[in-house]
Amino acid sequence: MTVLAPVSGSAAPVPRKKRRVRVWSERRTRFGLLNATPVVVYLLILFVYPIFSTLMLSLKGENGGFTLHWYADAFRGANLEILLTTLRISLETSLLSLVVGFTLASAISRLRPLWAGLAMLVVVVPHFISALVRTYGWIILLGDNGVVNNVLTDLHFPGAPFQLLYNEIGVVIGTTAVMLPYTVLLLYAVMKGIDRRLLAAAAGMGAGRITIFRRVYVPLVAPGLVNAGVLSFILCLGYYLTPALMGGEKQTMVASLIDEQVMKQNQWNGASALGIILLLLTFAGLLLLRLLKSAGDTLRKRGATS
């Protein structure tokens, strides 16, 4: 009877516990952890702790006990109307930013590099000006005796002068102007990377301009449209300055309500609940973005295999 000796080249599998000890004992791992420690501490102090404190404050009742009263109060009466107004204005701003941004980015992407750079400067540079100054600039332009109404009146436009301030129209115009640079930058980056030979190939196969735009160009730009739309929506959710200055009582948004509860009513618990709701809406927007990206990748894979 012969006994087979183990092959010298093969080694017994290392237990998982020993493998973890070996990884943690490596110099590279310890060096990486040492470098990551300041970043982790920074995030814990400046991001995690404030959010956790706000969450605990929103769950604290007037008697110091646990309660969901502030969340229930945020979803009823005038507070619910303000929350719905915030969602509606954010959605309108996102859609208008996409329409205007798509047109601008598409036109800029067709220019020569020099002219495209100058055009992008015109779009981006106003973003570095104080938001307060820009908002007052729009108030001057859109006022009853502003430049826009004066031009429309001189042209004998029917219905001029229009009420363009202290209503939803003024708020959407102002917030769209703030979100437009982000939209144009995102869409321009996507459009610049499109291979124009694909459009030429579609035209060579007999496709018309509308067909090329609908079936070739838009699918290629779709990821940028989704990113720009969700980003504009998320940024507009918590925007304060422009809606407060260019809107009326019916255009009060959640950020203005939080400011009122903190500064005038000294109601930190209710303001904290509203802040957590905005944070959850932001996370929902990011989750929607991730789902749309996954769905788009799935559709592209199916199209490639079919």
Image (tube, rainbow, N blue to C red):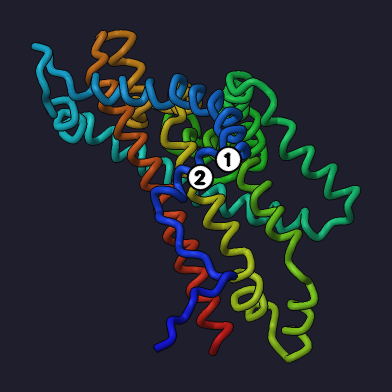
Secondary element type, mark 2: helix
Q: Nearer the viewer, residue 155 or 241?
A: 241
**What's the mark number on residue 216?**
none
Q: Nearest the camera: 4 or 110?
A: 4
Tag 1: amino acid:
Glu
Label 1 crowd bin: few (<14), some (14–19), many (20+), radius 10 Å? few
Number of marks in picture: 2
Residue 166, x across and y down, in percent: 44, 27
According to the picture, the residue beneath numbered tag 1 turns out to be 26
Distance of mark 2 from mark 1, alpha carbons?
A: 6 Å
**The residue under label 2 is which amino acid type?**
Arg
Q: Residue at x 66, y 36 (%)?
A: 151
Left or right of 147? Residue 192 is: right
Query: Crowding at label 2, few (<14), some or many (≥20) Cα neighbours within 10 Å?
Result: few
Q: Quadrant of residue 176?
A: top right
Q: Give the quadrant of the C terminus.
A: bottom right
The answer to whether marks 2 and 1 mark residues whose Cβ atoms lie closer than 8 Å is yes
Which residue lies under the disc numbered 2? 22
| Residue positioned 14% across, 32% down in the render | 72
Percent coordinates x, y for residue 145 in the rendering = 59, 25
Instruction: Name the residue at the front extreme.
Output: 1
On the picture, is 107 further left or further right than 254? right
Q: Is residue 163 visible?
A: no
Give residue 124's position: percent from left, percent from top.
72, 36
Identify the secondary structure beneath mark 1: loop
